[in-house]
Image (cartoon, coloured by chain):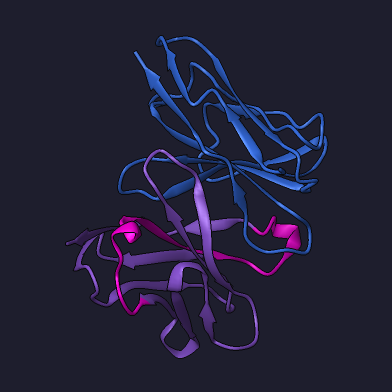
Chain colours: A purple, B blue
């Protein structure tokens, strides 16, 4: 079974500072990896994904994440936080087998607060 | 524009009543999913469907039922057997061969 752990349910950063959100996964084979963002009372929006190829993945809104197989990690970063980055962020994994439904398993989420 | 529509956005239900949440997509996506979101617990899978007239239980299917009579529609019924139904419910869809979901804007269900 797959599982996802996000370290820190809340993160506070100053505007202009580095944003670092940690995600570790457990899977018998390297899964597909995703980061989503959720604004209050809304659905989830895909930030970026890793399926194959280059391990450093760039997404929308200046975010990027690096897949590190040896560390089973997929941490999300943004060099300079903006007030609009205040939201909840979810890391998710999906298996590679269609027969299993390509189901997404989510971490518990990290809520980001940006201080002026 | 294509997308997923969930309705209603807010729903109140009395204890002991069944209620159905609507999810419609016009993206021509093949698979559809229902997730439940509770604070601090992330999203948990209730049911999913990869093709019309077929669906599978997720991790927390007890007290819920679904149908998939049309490709575009995947309604979720929260039955009176669900002991703690107050939550935010999210519907999602995915196109075969692609990875990652498109999400609806959610329905917040409150039992009163």
- Does the magenta-highlighted stretch encompass residue A94? yes
Name the foreground residue: A92 vs A28: A92
Residue B59 placed where, x, y %? Answer: 53, 45
Quarter-of-image position of residue B71: top right
Query: How many discs appear?
Result: 0
B71 relative to B81, above or below? below
Name the foreground residue: B26 vs A6: B26
Q: Residue at x 80, y 46 (%)?
A: B28
- Does the magenta-highlighted stretch encompass residue A97? yes
Position of A62 with respect to A96 (left or right) is left
Point out the stretch of residues depicted in magenta: A78-102
A99 relative to B78, above or below? below
Name the foreground residue: A25 vs A84: A84
Is residue A1 among the parts visible in the rendering? no
Residue A71 placed where, x, y %? Answer: 41, 86
Quarter-of-image position of residue B99: bottom right
Quarter-of-image position of residue A89: bottom left
Q: Residue at x 65, y 82 (%)?
A: A52
Residue A61 placed where, x, y %? Answer: 46, 67
Q: Quadrant of the C terminus of chain A?
A: bottom left
Residue B62 placed where, x, y %? Answer: 52, 32
Is residue A81 among the parts visible in the rendering? yes
């Amino acid at each position: 079974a797959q599982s996802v752990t996000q370290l820190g349910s809340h993160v506070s950063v100053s505007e202009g500072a580095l944003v670092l959100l940690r995600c570790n996964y457990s899977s018998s084979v390297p899964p597909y990896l995703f980061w989503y963002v959720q604004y209050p009372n809304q659905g989830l929006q895909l930030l970026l994904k890793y399926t194959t190829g280059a391990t450093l993945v760039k997404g929308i809104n200046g975010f990027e994440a690096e897949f590190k197989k040896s560390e089973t990690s997929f941490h999300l970063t943004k060099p300079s936080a903006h007030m609009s980055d205040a939201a909840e962020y979810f890391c998710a994994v999906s298996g590679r087998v269609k027969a299993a439904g390509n189901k997404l398993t989510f971490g518990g989420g990290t809520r980001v607060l940006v201080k002026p | 524009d294509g997308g997923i529509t969930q309705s209603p956005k807010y729903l109140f239900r009395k204890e002991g009543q069944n209620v159905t949440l609507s999810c419609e997509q016009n993206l021509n996506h093949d698979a559809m999913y229902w997730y439940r979101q509770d604070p601090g617990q992330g999203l948990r899978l209730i049911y999913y469907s990869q093709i019309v007239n077929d669906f599978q239980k997720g991790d927390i299917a007890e007290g819920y039922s679904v149908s998939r009579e049309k490709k575009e529609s995947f309604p979720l019924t929260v039955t009176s057997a669900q002991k703690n139904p107050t939550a935010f419910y999210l519907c999602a869809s995915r196109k075969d061969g692609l990875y990652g979901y498109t999400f609806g804007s959610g329905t917040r269900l409150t039992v009163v």
